[in-house]
Every structure is written in structure tokens, then in C-alpha cells.
Image: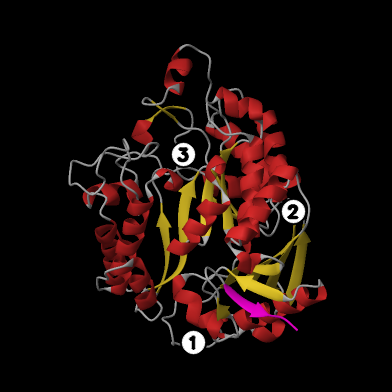
Amino acid sequence: VLTKPYTCPGECLFCPKEPGLPKSYLKEEPGAARAYQNEFDPYLQVKSRLDSYHAIGHPIDKIELLILGGSWSAYPSTYREHFVKRCFDAMNGTESKTLAEAQAKNEKAESRNVGMVVETRPDMITPEEIAGMRRLGVTKVQMGAQSFDDRILQKNCRGHSVEDTLNACALLRAAGFKIVLHWMPNLLGATPESDRGDFTRMWEGGFSPDEIKIYPTQLVREAPLYELWEEGQYRPYSTETLVDLIADIKPGIPEHCRVNRIVRDIPSGYIVAGSRRSSLRQDVHAELRERGKRCRCVRCREIRGRAVDTENLVLQDFLYHPADAEEHFLSYTTPNDQLAGYLRLSLPLEAGSAVRKRMRQELYQTVPELENAAMIREVHVYGQALEVGADMPGAAQHSGLGTSLIEKAEETAVNSGFKSIAVIAAVGTRLYYEDRGFRRAELYMVKDLP
């Protein structure tokens, strides 16, 4: 669902009017088109999407809600609460007077929210903003990092720094959020070679996102970059150059990260120069096969709907160290290296710059249940798309893998000296974690460890 374009603080966001579009979106993009057709009404957007899934026979009992559009943190808090409540109303199939009432209903609703995603800027992440997102039920945050080179960021007027992105990633991780970063090759001032180096900094510089979207810069007439292209100061990469670049970097993506996208879904008619290929992911995979290489990111290894033999699964613990944390990517893997399920466990460290230490201390003052707690940031088990309570032989979702992963996370936390473990539960998963011994704190679910 897309938020309504926010034009000025004096405008009433609830007044009906001819809707525009959030910055960086085009009317013919699928998500934007649905939002425009529904006049950006959150209830209608969610309901129409649920109706379309139901019409094709897809279960709609477990819903991940993506709230996209403008920078979420820039909207007034009243609008944000109203928007989320109306999304819950649509999932619940009934209206509530308050957000808290809508969330309570959703715990047992036919369409339960199992994840909520918002977009914002790296320089807007603060302890107060994190607490506000958790009150709404947010579990995952997308940020437009775009580059890890301050020179490129300044040249492209991004308005934030590399340090802002690192601080935001570290603070979000300490608060248990899943982190999605957007990365853009072919920005003004970049070259294929500098982009290769820039991409490695995502992993070597402490950012280590859980998911990434690769958005090659696409030149549209409405962008200020268009004038520089007309003047010969900017040159878009060809399709061949992009395929070669992404095929070079993709095998180096660590196994804990998922590549959600490799190209932005912009209608080709808007693109005035450069690659118009919407099948760039397929082109890259074909190039990798030609080279005899493969990518081991989460998306390339997930088992999806195939049946599994749980007796042959191997429990693995991939350890890595982003800024200020020790991360364990616990996974059940098949003999042919496919993911049947995984859990992200974060063990906070007393490390980092003075700024990040101060931000982390403010976070613990704002959300005291997180202090000295290990953090489960995600539990994901693959399998056939089954409704809640249904069963199917070989379905990984119904093989106890989630419970087993949680038990392994608790054991790892105990061995590292932690006395409690918290989980960033979505509203619709609270009962699941209660059944596994977690209790409700103010914004998280917590369990004492022996």
C-alpha cells in the first residue's frame, strides 16, 4: 500500500482531493496504480489486494503489509496511526475505534498481520522513531542507502551521509528490526568499477543488511538528472554493462542476505536512455550459469513450496559481525543447499562510535525491555502456502522447524551469557510466541533464560 503524498504541514491529509503521487513513483507502476485507483485510501488498498488474492485461490490468512510511498518518518503521527489502523481494519474485516483495538482483533483474525514494513531515510532513525514504529507494529524497515561513498551521495543530493546509514543500521538491529537497504549503481559520478568497490563496502563496512534491493539508476524525463544527460554530463550504463556488473557482485552476497529486486519496475516508456530490460534478474542468472557460478543469497536458496524430509535437514549457524553486534543466521538446510527455514539472532555488543553508544543507551532508556537481552529479529519457515491450522505432508511450515530454531537461539543466547531473549513479534504472531513461553512486555515479547 502507498501513503498519500504529503505536501505541506498545513494541509489536512484526510480531506478528499485529487490524489497526486509520492515522489519517485510513477502512475503506471503496479503498486502506484492500485493506490491511485483507490485514492490512496489504506482500507481500500488492502481490501482490494486481499480480494484479488482470494479470487485466485491464494490463502490470505498470513499477511505481510508493505507501506511504501514517501518517507514514513516525515508524516504526522496522527496520519501514520490512522493509516495503520485502517490497514488493520481491512485485514480484520471490521472497523475498530482505536489502533489498539484493531491490533487486538487481528491476533485472531482470518487475515493476520505477520510482518509490517515501512520506508524511511537513514537520517530519520532515532530511539523515539523506533519506539513509535513498534507501537504501530512495524517489524521491518527499508532505507535508501543508494551508495556507501559520501562523494557520490553529495553529488546526487541524497541529503544523508554514509555514517547516517551505518548508525541507522546499528540502531535498527539493536531494536530487532529486519533491515532492507536500497543500492543504486550508475548514479551520477559512479563507474562500473567504482560500483563494484561500493558494493563490497555494504558487507565490509558493518552495514550487512538482511535484504537488499538493487535499483540501477533509470533515466526518466522528470528527473533533474535528465538535464545533465542532455548536456553530456551523465551516461547511463547499457544492459550489457549492468548484467556484467551485477553478475560480478552477486556471487559475493553473503548467505544471510536476500536479494529482493535487481531492477525497479518502471514502465519502459518512461525510460529515455539506458537499459529498459525488466528481466534483468533472469539475464544476470543466465550470465552466472554461463560463467559456471552461483549466488547463495536467501532468495536463490529458499525451498519455497517444495516438500522437505526433516530427517535430512542440517542445522547450520552462519556467524557474522555487523556494526555493534554478533549475528547468528541459524538455518535448516537440505542436502542440496536449499533453505527450509531460518532465524536471525542478534547479540548486542558494547562497541561502536560514541554517537552509536549514546543512541543505543537512549534506546534502552526508551524501551527498557531490550537492555541486556538477546534479540530474535526474524523466524521464517518455508513451505506450501497453507492456511492457519491446515496440514500437508512434507510442508516445512508444519514440521516444528520454527520451534526448533527458537530453542537453538535460546541455547546460543544462554551460552553467550544473556539472561533474557526478546522477539520483535508482529501483531498476528503474538499468540505463536506466547505458546512458546514468551510474555508481553511494552513493545516486544520477552522470555527469561536460565
Could you tell me the amino acid type at mark 3?
Answer: Arg
Q: Residue 392 carries which label?
A: 1
Q: Residue 366 carries which label?
A: none
Could you tell me the amino acid type at mark 1?
Answer: Met
Q: Earlier in the sequence, mark 3 or mark 2?
A: 3
Residue 343 position (above or below residue 393):
above
Check if residue 449 falls in the magenta segment.
yes
Residue 434: image location, x then y, percent: 54, 83
Q: Residue 277 carries which label?
A: 3
- Alpha carbons under labels 2 and 1: distance apart: 41 Å
Left or right: where does residue 181 sit relative to residue 412?
Answer: left
Which SS class for mark 3?
A: loop
Residue 150: image location, x then y, percent: 65, 29
Residue 212 position (above or below residue 154):
below
Q: Quadrant of the C terminus?
A: bottom right
Residue 248: image location, x then y, percent: 69, 41
Residue 334: image location, x then y, percent: 68, 74
Residue 333 visible here: no
Assess disc 2: are there few (<14), some (14-19) or many (≥20) residues with their C-alpha within 10 Å of its C-alpha: many
Closest to the observer, 325 or 101 = 101
Q: What stretch is highlighted in magenta?
A: 445-450
Assess disc 3: are there few (<14), some (14-19) or many (≥20) residues with their C-alpha within 10 Å of its C-alpha: some
Which SS class for mark 1?
A: loop
Left or right: where does residue 351 sit relative to residue 435?
Answer: right
Q: Earlier in the sequence, mark 2 or mark 1?
A: 2
Q: Give the residue number, with chain letter if any, for mark 2.
A: 324
Residue lying at 28% horizontally and 67% vertically, measured from the top left: 90
Residue 181 position (above or below residue 449):
above
Q: Do the residues labelled 3 and 2 touch (CB within 8 Å)?
A: no
